Amino acid sequence: MIFFKNFIQITVYLFLSFTLNIIEWVPSLMLENIVNVSIIFLYILSVFFVYKIIRNIYDQQTKKILWKIIVYTVLLLSYIGFWAIATIGVGYGKSTYVESYKFDEKLFYVYQNVDLSYEVSVKESNLPLRSLPIASFTDNLITLKKEKHYIYATGKGLYEKIYNLKKNMKENND
C-alpha cells in the first residue's frame, strides 16, 4: 500500500511539473525563474519518493535480493526520465518572446513560433498568463501600432487590423 501511495505522489509531482512547463507564462525573468526552480524542486521530490519506495521494498524483504531492488530502481527512474523527456520536448515546442507593447493599459506580446511564424497574444487581466494567439502571421517580423481604438499589425507588405480596444475584442479578418 505504501508503494502505491508513494507512486501516486511521484506521478502527481511529475504531472504538476509538466503542467507548469506547458502553461504559457508572460515574459518575466523573475516568474520564469520561480517556475523553473519549482519544476526542479518537484523532480527532486519525486526522486526522494523513489528512494522511499526502494528503501521500503528493501526493508520488507526477508532475503535481501539485490537484483529486485535494481529492477525497481531502474523502472522508477525510467518513469521519471519519461516525464523529463516529455517536459523537455514540450519546452522546445514553445514560442520565443520577441517584443511587448502597451496600449491603453492592455499588454500585447509578439512571439516567434518554432516554424518561424509570428503570433500576437494579450496578457490576461489578473493572472501572469498570456492568452491564446489573437493573430498569426508568416514570414516577416511584425510590429504593433495603434490608430484610434484599433491595434494594427504592420510589417513588410502587411497592415492588418487585429484588435479593438474599445470593445476589448480581437478583430475577425477572415
Image (cartoon, helix red, strand yellow):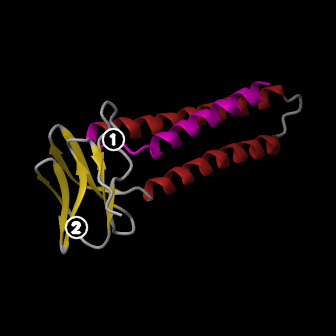
SS majority, magenta: helix
| Cβ atoms at labels 2 and 1 below 8 Å apart | no
Image position of 53 (left or right of 166): right
Dot 1 falls on a residue whose secondary structure is helix
Image position of 72 (left or right of 126): right
Q: Is residue 51 above or below residue 24?
A: above
Q: Nearer the viewer, residue 140 or 57?
A: 140
167 is within the stretch colored magenta: no
Q: Which residues are magenta?
A: 1-30
Q: Nearer the viewer, residue 66 or 14?
A: 14
Residue 35 % position (x, y): 39, 37
Q: Is residue 155 above or below residue 41?
A: below
Extreme left residue here?
A: 148
Q: How many marks?
A: 2
Q: Nearer the viewer, residue 125 or 33?
A: 125
- Residue occupying image coordinates x 19% and y 75%: 157
- Residue occupying image coordinates x 75% and y 24%: 2
The label number, if any, that marks residue 135 in the structure image: none
Residue 75 % position (x, y): 72, 47
The three-letter amino acid code for the residue at tag 1 is: Glu
Image position of 46 (left or right of 28): right
Q: Quadrant of the C terminus?
A: bottom left
Number of residues whose C-alpha sits closer than 10 Å to that of mark 2, classed few (under 14), some (14–19) or many (20 or more): some
Residue 1 % position (x, y): 80, 25
The label number, if any, that marks residue 141 in the structure image: 2
14 is within the stretch colored magenta: yes
The three-letter amino acid code for the residue at tag 2 is: Leu
Mark 1 — residue?
A: 32
Residue 27 appears in the rendering: no
Q: Is residue 2 above or below residue 42?
A: above
Mark 2–mark 1 distance (CA, rounded to whole Å): 25 Å
Image position of 127 (left or right of 38): left
